[in-house]
Amino acid sequence: MIAVATTEDRLAGVCERLRARGASVIDVAAPSDIRRVVLASVEDERSVAGLVASLRAEGVMAVSRPDGGVALRKWLRDARTITFGGRITVCRAWSEHDRRGLAGLVELGPGGFGDGRHPTTAQIIEELVDRIAGGERVLDVGCGSGVLGLCALRLGAAEAVAVEIDPDAVEAARRNAGINGVGDRLEATLAPLSGIEGSFDVVVANIARAGIVELASELVAHVSPDGWLAVGGISPSQCSQVAGFLRPLTEVGRRTSGEWATLVLAGGGQCRMNPRVTRPHSGGDDIDPSIAGRR
């Protein structure tokens, strides 16, 4: 089976394309006022991958979908909406879960790492929820799908620059910016970090210890005097060592979840923080379990 994420105004065209390729449209889900998810079957399941690839080449957000059983239950579970701190919600565009009325919706198409489910991604989104006050300039190093920059923009940041070494990830981030209507505010680029000009109020880097250490001086150099840096993809046991490489920034926050940790560091200036957040900043998981996966 194939699932295709589209919109109401493009629904007829998508269905026509599917039928022209021998697929049978069996259902259309409407998980939000705008989003439509078309479910289609093909006689030869071996042709699903080829059909998905050809549709994606034409800019259609298509994915293969299990027909039923355990595989479908897992697929639906992985496509759940996840809401962070009551302010931001992330899901894949082809998710069939209802998302009307959910806060700060960010939808992601195919390609690029990061959809909010991995602890390292979730921890940095939680920091963005706590700390974005509005109007910030954000730098996302190793952007993957662009999810961190997109969340920052949805939370009120003014602009984001997303840096990657993978051309496919850059394309995915650009597509996702378009899906979310912020293509004019997110710049995804293959430029090296050393070639990015200016300083940023927020710098995030979910790139693991080796990448953080390699880019430490450049990461620090891009943080504005009143800004902050969040680094993820490290273990709790690596936190002190990683913080040492990021001097003169000093640790102002830490989150841990199992074997994963995220560090937040700032310089001598006053680190900006969302004035609406009143709880103490500490480790832990801020994903609201009553909202994550709500249908």
Image (cartoon, grey):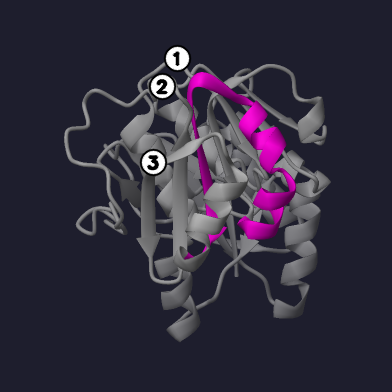
Q: Nearer the viewer, mark 3 or mark 2?
A: 3
The residue that disc 1 covers is 135
- Occupied quadrant, residue 179: top right
Q: In the rendered view, would you say 69 is above or below 61? A: below
Between 195 and 28, the one nearer to me in the picture: 195
Q: Are marks 3 and 1 in contact (CB under 8 Å)?
A: no
Measured Cα–Cα span from mark 2 to mark 1: 6 Å
**Magenta highlight range:** 208-235
Name the residue at 80% across, 30% down. Answer: 194
The residue that disc 3 covers is 127
Q: In the rendered view, would you say 254 is above or below 186? A: below
- Occupied quadrant, residue 161: top right
- Dot 3 lies on which element? helix
Name the residue at 27% across, 56% down. Answer: 294
Numbered badge on residue 156: 2
Could one spot residue 59 in this view of the protein? no
Residue type highlighted by circle 3: Glu
Q: In the rendered view, would you say 181 is above or below 171? A: above
Crowding at label 3, few (<14), some or many (≥20) Cα neighbours within 10 Å? many
Q: Are marks 2 and 1 in contact (CB under 8 Å)?
A: yes
Query: For residue 221: magenta?
Result: yes
